[in-house]
Image (cartoon, rainbow, N blue to C red):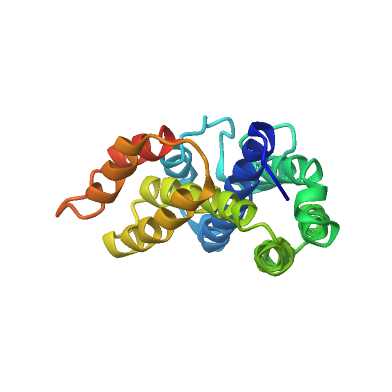
Amino acid sequence: MGIISVEQTDHLYWLGRYTERVYTTIRVYSRSFDTMIDEVTDSYQKWCQLVDIPDIYGSKDVFRKKYPFDAENPDSIISNLNRAYDNAIVLRESIGSETLSYIQLAIYDMNKAMVSHAPLIEMQRVIDNILAFWGIADDRIDSEQVRNIIKAGKRIERIDLYARLGADKKELQREVHRMVPRVEKSGMKYDKEKFESIKRLVEEPDLDYYKIVNEVETMI
């Protein structure tokens, strides 16, 4: 592919982050979907607090509809999926049309989920298409650096979300260990002190989730 511009690097990095954000938030949302139907006390406020988004919903019923599907809400799942597509479309020459097509399919299935009586089925297909996107990117993208930038964004986003959601130490350690070589091989500029700090933080006896989030958010 040759030299990767700063602009291309930014698009690749955020493509990785947004696809991971959609993947993980759908997985967590799906686990909570049935629980929210029957719960007496609304729990969606805790989710908003954990992932640092404003509570604009007012009730669990509104949250269940608008958080996944409201394209006017910048924090919704569909908005993050659309951002993934916006980054992917300008990278068509770098990632290939076949790779891009799986993001397009994910949007198609998300729109089907919006009008479905069983939205979790279509949302599972969104997850499947994101997994297929990552798989085809590995298979079809020749540039190792391009692949590493996407994967660095993916791992950084996962660490960010897992820390916000209070994942256990082993999960965070695993993701940090997987992030390290991707960032090092990506060619991106990063704060080496924060990079080393994240590696140390996940080895501490008591995890400081707030500090992990802060370090990973400001590392690139």
Q: Position of residue 200 (x, y in %)?
A: 22, 49
Q: Quadrant of residue 129?
A: bottom right
For the point 73% across and 41% down, the residue is 87
Q: Residue at x 66, y 47 (%)?
A: 68
| Residue 80 percent coordinates (x, y) | 66, 42
In the rendered image, residue 70, in percent from the top left (x then y), is placed at 72, 39
Vertical comparison of 18 with 218: above or below? below
The residue lying at 59 percent from left, 34 percent from top is 57
Residue 94 position, x and y percent, is 76, 50
Q: Is residue 46 left or right of residue 37?
A: left
Q: Residue furthest front?
A: 2
Report the side of 27 relative to 198 (left or right). right
> Number of callouts in the render?
0
As displayed, is residue 32 above or below residue 62? below
Point 31% across, 60% down: residue: 173
Left or right position of 182 against 125: left
In the picture, residue 56 is in which quadrant?
Answer: top right
Give the camera-side residue of 177 and 212: 177
Extreme residue toward the left, this view: 205
Q: Nearer the viewer, residue 40 or 21?
A: 21
